[in-house]
Image (tube, rainbow, N blue to C red):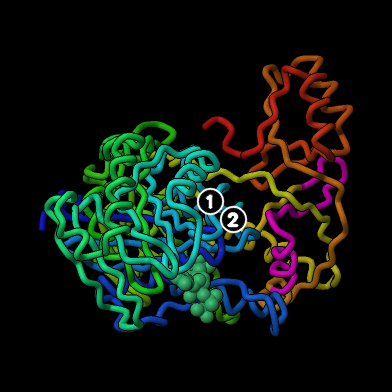
Amino acid sequence: MSFLEEIQRRRTFGIISHPDAGKTTLTEKLLLFGGAIQEAGAVKSNKIKKGATSDFMEIERQRGISVATSVLAFEYKGKKINILDTPGHKDFAEDTFRTLTAVDSVIVVIDVAKGVEEQTEKLVAVCRMRKIPIIVFINKLDREGKDAFDLMDEVEKKLGLHVTPLSFPIGMGYDFKGIYNIWEQNINLFSGDSKKNIEETIAIENIDSPELENIVGEKPAQKLREELELIQEVYPTFDRNAYLDGNLQPVFFGSALNNFGVREILDCFIEIAPSPKPKESDTRLVEPTEEKLSGFVFKIHANMDPKHRDRLAFVKIVSGTFERNKPYTHVRLNKALKFSSPNAFFAEKKEIVDISYPGDIVGLHDTGNFKIGDTLTEGETMNFRGIPSFSPEHFRYINNADPLKAKQLEKGIDQLMDEGVAQLFTLEMNNRKVIGTVGALQYEVIQYRLEHEYGAKCTYENFPAHKACWVKPDDAKSEEYKEFLRVKQKFMAKDKYGQLVFLADSEFSIQMTQSKYPSVKLFFTSEYNE
Ligand code: G4P
């Protein structure tokens, strides 16, 4: 197969949802279709389950699973599909945001009864910002839920999307008869029994033919015709370019648990979803078809065995091929590196691989060279953009609880920050360290891992910040900027990359600062030049 064909047959995407909408179930069913797993239940949930075990033990369990499910790859009808796993728990949202920089499209799963939930809103907002093509899957149609039209309205309003259904349910819950597939123009009958792999598809040439009555019954047939008419009036015809540009989102209905409507979405997905896309770097746009390798690190996973301090850096290949034992340039360090055992990912295993293509993810064993956002090239000096740090929502001082282990603590904090577990700020005034996180759970993770992996002990102390604002003055020499720095001295810090940050203690303080010092711009993500 040619290099070009290899690129064109790749589909790298993420499934996002609010916890419990059915992301894991859908992932598993897609793998079943791909023949990558043989039975349901094979994909372990990486959910943080509250309950019997304490939180950090649960997190360790979850970390163990998440290395195995970080990338789930399989072949389906000649296409190479890479599903990038995203944690559902909101405290790990930043992980998900970073993973979204490595996908070419997403499927959003929504629970038919619950509708659009909070986490879905946040994640879709990020996808929209990046114009990522989105397919919506409305799940759990075997249960009573919201009316399909109401739900599509809700999706448009709450998520700011512009939808068009490519399938439509016939009844719902107890009366769920099946799905009319607008994309393929056929009907799938829902049997409702537990024979999970059986799905009867009936081709329907003409929706007005009396055959429809025979298949689904008189009333449902009538209702379906009316609904399809309404769809034609209200929703735009599907246009692939509009979908690819992020301006139109097709909607599918189904029940992942019953394996119903899953093949339909998969078959449509492989046809319409984009193959690897060009990516902007700080110097130019990089096309996947370029011969020379380029890629970037979007995730770092620490080894689960504390005796081996090596980590796995996940690299998304943007252009060229990644070859084993070939030297590549680590741009930030300006250093040539060779990788003798790059890992490729399959359903639930990883294997050493000789060659990988754009769209693929390779896992590189690393002893501390990589940080999230690092770029690899064949010599060119450029950096991929778009892996921002968002402002944390929680802030605490971190103190050393064992003076003999100061070095270990420093190293541990440094490496955990490289992994993106949290963000570190060093106060300008007194050099004290403040850890910022998206969720409170991370403090437990950090404390636990510092102790178990680095032999260091820490304590926390509250730091009264509300938001981290990256600072950029219009004129660094202006009196206004100098005054801002003097007045806000107590709240000024440097992030891990030496960028200046104002740790504002309230929304009010941000507003006051903005009106008092208009020439000092405040940004809430670290990549403010984007
Ligand atoms: P998540 O990854 O998005 O968090 O959700 P997950 O797939 O784990 O699904 C959450 C729950 O919803 C699971 O039930 C799952 O079986 C159920 N579910 C998924 N798809 C469907 C569907 O189409 N119909 C119905 N009725 N239920 C569905 P659970 O009881 O929480 O877990 P489990 O004990 O079944 O694993």
Compared to 454, does 285 lie above or below?
Answer: above
Residue placed furthest toward the top: 479
Classify mark 2: helix, strand or loop: helix
The answer to whether residue 69 is magenta is no
Q: Quadrant of the N terminus?
A: bottom left
Image position of 528 (left or right of 219): right
For residue 287, side relative to residue 101 (left or right): left
Q: Residue at x 76, y 53 (%)?
A: 394
Question: Label 1: how many residues lie within 10 Å, few (<14), some (14-19) or many (20+)?
Answer: many
Under circle 1, the secondary element is helix
Front residue of this view, candidates 323 and 423: 423
Q: Which residue is mark 2?
A: 93
Q: What residue type is disc 1 on?
A: Phe
Q: Position of residue 296 (x, y in %)?
A: 42, 50
Q: Quadrant of residue 172?
A: bottom left
Q: Which mark is residue 97?
A: 1
Residue drawn 55% across the image and 30% down it: 529
Residue 20 vs residue 388, the one in the foreground: 20
Q: Indicate left or right for 505 with 498 as reference.
A: right
* Magenta highlight range: 426-448
